[in-house]
Amino acid sequence: MKDLKSLENKLFLSYFEDGIVDLLIGVMFIFDGLLMLTENTKFVGLAIIFTLLISPFKKKFIIPRIGFVKFRVTREHKIKKSMFVLLIAGILAFNIVLYFLTAKGNSNFLQDYAFIFLGMFMAMPPLFGAFFTGVKRFYLYAVLIFLVFFHENFTHSTAPIDFMIFGAVLSGFGLFYLVKFLQKYPLPINEAENV
Amino acid sequence: MSEKLENSFLDINKLIHEPARLMILSYLYVIESADFLFLMRQTGLTKGNLSSHLSKLEAGGFIEIEKKFVDKIPRTLIKLSNNGRDEFLNYRKKMLELLQ
């Protein structure tokens, strides 16, 4: 059934062709950078709003162009299970890292390389995302996130700029994929759904 | 060619054994359901062509078509019937046996 499996993967990947996730998460990182730079907490709200926009944006602009598909229960269960495992692993890893970084009598090693550990933790979601969805560019994002924190660990001052550069790169990729998607799938002239 | 083999070739379901319909069934086999537009985009068939093949598949009991409104917009949902799923698997098995 390898051939049918690859067909299923092809259909699943078609839902990431639009670059919306990249674009909106990129903008979220730009707002995070602005927050750190200006200490204006309004950017937290804006960052959250942009993350929450992914689903309604897809519904409003993408589904009318590409159509609607419901994947089989096994595939949907796999996605939900992966997300749950990822969330639990993320929370655990974050707490472990925080514990080691703040514990008394801690070695200087952990404190000296705090941002590198944080970078490893922050690179996990795109890494797992790439693994479970098969979207190769998510691996690149994982590497870039790690590099942002790696760089910050040694400069201790450029985090906001690094965040904004990373956000801009992500948004750039997102825009590129979105334009390609819009060209490939124009809005149907007649309502194809009526057929 | 042995008589048994000849009969096996003649046994092939002709409704499935048409490239466009086979493509539609393959797509529907790997998902739960899809709307008309999604199938049109993925298969690359024209609206009229896809509509005609879907009608034949529905008449043959291979697929189920449900028309409903989502946010006041009409949506035609297409899914493989249980019979269609079994027939698709039988066809696949038979073709593999014959061409091996």
Image (tube, coloured by chain):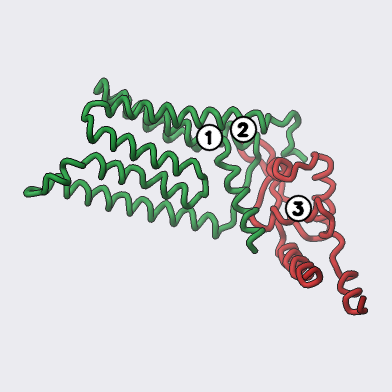
A39 on left or right of A129: left
Q: Quadrant of residue A116?
A: top left
* In the foreground, A116 or B16: A116
Q: Marks 2 and 1: in contact by CB < 8 Å?
A: yes
- Disc sitting over residue B23 in the figure: 3
Q: Residue at x 43, y 35 (%)?
A: A52
Q: Residue furthest top?
A: A38
Q: Quadrant of residue A73?
A: bottom right
- Disc sitting over residue B33 in the figure: none
Label 2 sits on residue: A181
Label 1 sits on residue: A19
- Circle 2 chain: A
The green-coloured chain is labelled A
- Where the N terminus of chain A falls, by quadrant? bottom right
Task: Give the CA separation, mark 1 to mark 2.
Answer: 8 Å
Task: Give the CA separation, mark 1 to mark 3.
Answer: 27 Å
Q: Residue furthest left?
A: A105
Look at label 2 and name its amino acid.
Answer: Phe
In terms of secondary structure, where does tag 3 sit? helix
Look at label 1 and name its amino acid.
Answer: Gly
A1 on left or right of A83: right
Q: Residue A35's x, y, as percent?
A: 29, 25
Color used for chain B?
A: red
Q: Residue at x 75, y 66 (%)?
A: B92
Q: Residue A137's x, y, as percent?
A: 49, 41
